[in-house]
Amino acid sequence: MELSERKIKILNIAVEEFIKDSAPITSGSVKDRTALDCSTATLRSELNALEAMGFLKQLHTSGGRVPTAQGYRFYVENMLKNVKATNSELKEVRQLIENRTKNLSEIVSGIAKIISKATNYPTVVLVNGIENLILDEFKIVPLLGEKCMVLIGTNYGYITQQLEISTNAKSCEDASNYLTKYFKGETMGFLMDNIQQFKAGMHGEISAFQSVVDNVVVGLSRLNKQKLLNVQSEGVVDLVDNSSADEAKKVLKTLSDENELIEVLDKNEGISARIDDDKCSVVKAPILVGGKQVASIGVFGPQKMDYLSIASALKVVIDQLSDEKGE
């Protein structure tokens, strides 16, 4: 819907004022906040028009107006187009991702914790692009009993798997060397798509440890179909303290529903927001490695979240991750 420049300015003020102190907007408060060269009567007319268009609503007949879900969406979509990374305090991100020996789940948990602490809202990270991770090395180690541990080094941290297989140290070492030699620098998706072809062309070379390779491939295939989800709820206390009971209930209900979290975060293009009267709001962003998405971050809260501050914090983190991990 096309809005005039004046209507956009008035709507932005209405949203920002309500986010800041929950104060409904009036023609007088708009006049105080802007340098618009128009009368209070004209501003009142503009507020009436924004209400008629569905961007604002009046809680009481004689009271001011507050943003609707449609108003929030318009504000967020316009404001997030050119959001800049202004928060320079997230030094923990660099420290976290510089240690490439960390387990993938630890890195995911760390990212979620940093964002949650920076924004004071619950944060979720979903790893939904494991096939795009670039392989660096394989280490397969026999354990007691008929088990072995698989450590897969990637450009986003280690992935670990425990397999049920009877084998010996020599077969584990040979399988590790084979997989590292032929798939180092390739994506996990490439390995899954081409492993059978490699095995067929090198049957004699891998016959002694083929059962180990086969089990690793089965384990990776299973892993590739999973969604690694990490929920950090450090911001829940602030959420409850600064939101209505109904708003807090919507957020907590969403955080407890794994399927909804995956649905909300699974497909993500750039920094964006979901705003819905019946559900909590989400500001989300993709994490890209080498230009391909490997994960998504979502910050969950009430409709009157400080969207720009949250988007700025997300921008810092995803830019940092892209810079460090895209090598």
Image: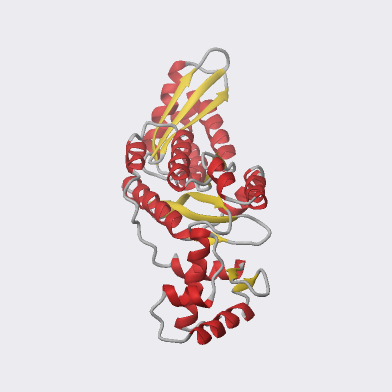
Res 187 quadrant in image:
top left
Question: Residue 134 at x, y = what percent?
Answer: 40, 43
Query: Relative to the observer, which residue lies in front, 109 or 276?
Result: 276
Res 22 quadrant in image:
bottom right
User: What coloring was used for the rendering?
Assistant: secondary structure
Position of the N terminus by quadrant: bottom right
Res 66 quadrant in image:
bottom right
Residue lying at 60% horizontally and 73% vertically, measured from the top left: 56
Q: For residue 271, say whether it is visible.
A: no
Question: Residue 266 at x, y = what percent?
Answer: 57, 52
Query: Relative to the observer, which residue lies in front, 15 or 185?
Result: 15
Q: Is residue 123 left or right of residue 180?
A: right
User: Which residue extends farthest top?
Assistant: 144
Residue lying at 55% horizontally and 19% vertically, measured from the top left: 147
Question: Residue 282 at x, y = what percent?
Answer: 55, 55
Q: Establish if 300 lies above or below 168.
A: below
Q: For residue 255, say whether it is visible.
A: yes
Query: Relative to the observer, which residue lies in front, 56 or 164?
Result: 56
Question: Residue 138 at x, y = what percent?
Answer: 42, 31
Q: Establish if 213 lies above or below 36.
A: above
Query: Relative to the observer, which residue lies in front, 116 or 205?
Result: 116
Number of callouts: 0
